[in-house]
Image (cartoon, helix red, strand yellow):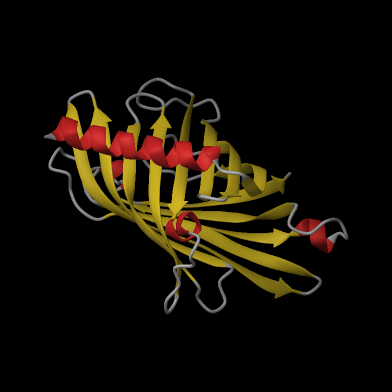
């Protein structure tokens, strides 16, 4: 049964990714971010992260990818590593674009099929697939609501659970420039029956458009902070003897190109 679920998720994700990649490119944005923060839980307390991101729109949907290169400032994690990496590839198929007919009713402006492949050092290999909607909400540049069945491969078995992931962006005027507030929530809503606990990760960025303030191009250079609240980080249940609830504020510099 579990092998069948994995095959369905992997096969569907491959179709989503292939169709998105084969579609004509409509727009794209690439960026490099530097983050510095302390008070991380489970992993070494102080971390520096370099993040390469790509976002693009296609005639069949959209695509978001990133990879983090995480460094522990000379410390080592529980596996003896002084650095690690983590990434995601997340294509989405738009039913409105594919049908040639807008799917819009109430606040919903599109219905999509969303997939994600998560990967990282060690045994991190997760496959996500499910329905999504794009919403048009007052004050938001964009608002996505993605719902996934989440399948995780582990050395000791296979795990499955449900995840809800809203993604948003808001631009606010600030004198001669702008403040951009964007981010996501990953809410794994249930235990998977394999020792992996439900968890909640809230991760917004608050960024000042420094490039626009200096008279350069807008939306090219940002400075600000990223906040990470992660309850039961990595699905490890918090206890009095093992704190897995993370509260971290990172300093941030982000350049788009």
Residue furthest toward the right?
215
Q: How many labels does the image show?
A: 0
Q: Residue furthest front?
A: 100
Residue 45 visible in the current orientation: no
Quarter of the image containing the N terminus?
Answer: top left
Q: Which residue is drawn at 24% across and 28% down?
A: 154
Q: Name the residue nearer the viewer: 59 or 237.
A: 59
Q: Depth check: 5 or 169 in front?
A: 5
Residue 66's x, y, as percent? Answer: 53, 39
Q: Is residue 139 left or right of residue 115?
A: right
**Rendered location of residue 186, percent (x, y):** 37, 53
Q: Is residue 243 above or below residue 71?
A: below
How far across and down, in percent of the image, does residue 104 sit? Answer: 45, 72
* Placement of the C terminus among the 4 image quadrants: top right
Residue 108 placed where, x, y %? 43, 72
Q: In which quarter of the image is residue 165?
A: bottom left
Q: Relative to 138, does residue 223 appear above or below in the rendering? A: above
What residue sits 72% from the left and 68% below the top? 178
Q: Residue at x 35, y 30 (%)?
A: 124
Residue 252 visible to an observer of this rendering? yes
Q: In this view, does 6 lie to the left or right of 184?
A: left
Q: Describe residue 202's horizontal placement relative to residue 200 as left or right.
A: right
Q: Which residue is drawn at 24% across and 32% down?
A: 7
Q: Is residue 248 left or right of residue 124?
A: right
């Amino acid at each position: 049964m579990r092998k069948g679920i994995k095959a369905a998720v992997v096969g569907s994700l491959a179709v989503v990714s292939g169709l998105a990649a084969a579609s004509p490119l409509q727009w794209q944005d690439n960026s490099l971010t530097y983050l510095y923060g302390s008070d991380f839980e489970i992993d070494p307390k102080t971390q520096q992260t370099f993040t390469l991101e790509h976002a693009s729109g296609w005639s069949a949907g959209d695509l978001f990818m990133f990879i983090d290169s995480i460094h522990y400032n000379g410390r080592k994690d529980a596996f003896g590593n002084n650095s690690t990496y983590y990434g995601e590839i997340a294509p989405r198929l738009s039913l409105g674009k594919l049908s040639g007919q807008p799917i819009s009713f109430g606040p919903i402006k599109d219905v999509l099929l969303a997939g994600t492949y998560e990967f990282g050092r060690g045994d991190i290999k997760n496959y996500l697939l499910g329905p999504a909607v794009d919403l048009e909400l007052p004050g938001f540049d964009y608002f996505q609501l993605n719902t996934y069945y989440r399948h995780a491969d582990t050395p000791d078995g296979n795990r499955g659970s449900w995840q809800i992931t809203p993604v948003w962006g808001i631009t606010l005027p600030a004198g001669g420039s702008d403040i951009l507030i964007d981010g996501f929530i990953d809410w794994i809503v249930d235990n998977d029956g394999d020792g992996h606990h439900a968890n909640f990760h809230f991760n917004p960025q608050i960024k000042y458009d420094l490039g626009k303030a200096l008279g350069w191009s807008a939306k090219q250079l940002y400075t600000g902070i990223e906040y990470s609240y992660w309850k039961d980080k990595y699905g490890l249940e918090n206890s009095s003897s093992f704190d897995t609830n993370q509260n971290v504020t990172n300093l941030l510099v982000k350049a788009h190109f």
